[in-house]
Amino acid sequence: MDTGANPSIQNNTSGCEGIGGYSDIRSGTGVTLKDGGGKVLATSFLDSVSGTSNSCVFKVSLASVPEVPFYTVEISHRGQLSYSLADMKTQDWSLDLTLGN
C-alpha cells in the first residue's frame, strides 16, 4: 500500500532531511557553485526551511556571484548540475531541485 510518504526523506522536530542513501542531504550540507571551467565562484550551505512526508524544501543563498556563460552547482558529493547564464536569468536566479521521486 502506498502511503504517499517519500522513503528518501524524513521530517521531524530536528527538521527535514534525507535518510538512507540520502542521509548527507540536510541542513548544513555544503553547496558549491563553479563556472564552466571548474573555478569555484561561491560556497554555502543548505538551510532546511520546511518539509512534509513527501518533500523537503531547503534554501541556499550565494552572495556576489559574477555573471559567467555557464554554472555548475553541486550539493554534497551528488554530482554537478549545469545551467547557462540565460537559464539562470530566465529562472530569476532561483533553482528548484528535487530529491526522490
Image: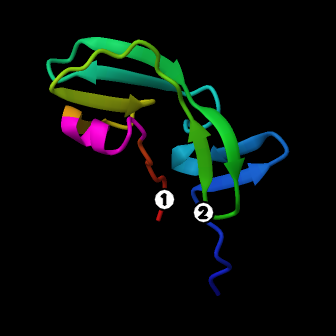
Magenta residues, start to end: 86-94
Q: Residue 91 in the image: state x and y as whole percent.
A: 35, 44
78 shown above or below 8 = above
In this rendered view, identify the residue nearer to me: 97 or 66.
66
Q: How is the rendered protein coloured?
A: rainbow
87 left or right, relative to 6:
left
Secondary structure beneath label 2: loop
Which residue is rendered at x = 64% and y = 87% of the image?
1
In the rendered image, is residue 97 in sight?
yes
Which residue is rendered at x = 65% and y = 32% of the image?
27
Amino acid under disc 2: Pro
> Of marks 1 and 2, which one's residue comes earlier in the chain?
2
Secondary structure beneath label 1: loop
In the rendered image, is residue 84 in sight?
no
Q: Kindly give the residue lying farthest to the bottom in the view shown.
A: 1
Q: Tag on residue 7?
A: 2
46 left or right, relative to 79:
right
The image quarter containing residue 9 is bottom right
74 left or right, relative to 37:
right
Which residue is rendered at x = 69% and y = 53% of the image?
51
Q: Kindly give the residue lying farthest to the right in the view shown.
A: 13
Q: Nearer the viewer, mark 1 or mark 2?
A: 1
Q: Which residue is mark 1?
A: 100
Which residue is rendered at x = 46% and y = 15% of the image?
63
Give the class, few, some or many, for how many residues have Cα within 10 Å of label 2's Cα (few <14, many ≥20): some
Amino acid under disc 1: Gly
98 shown above or below 34 = below
Distance (Cα) linking label 1 and label 2: 8 Å
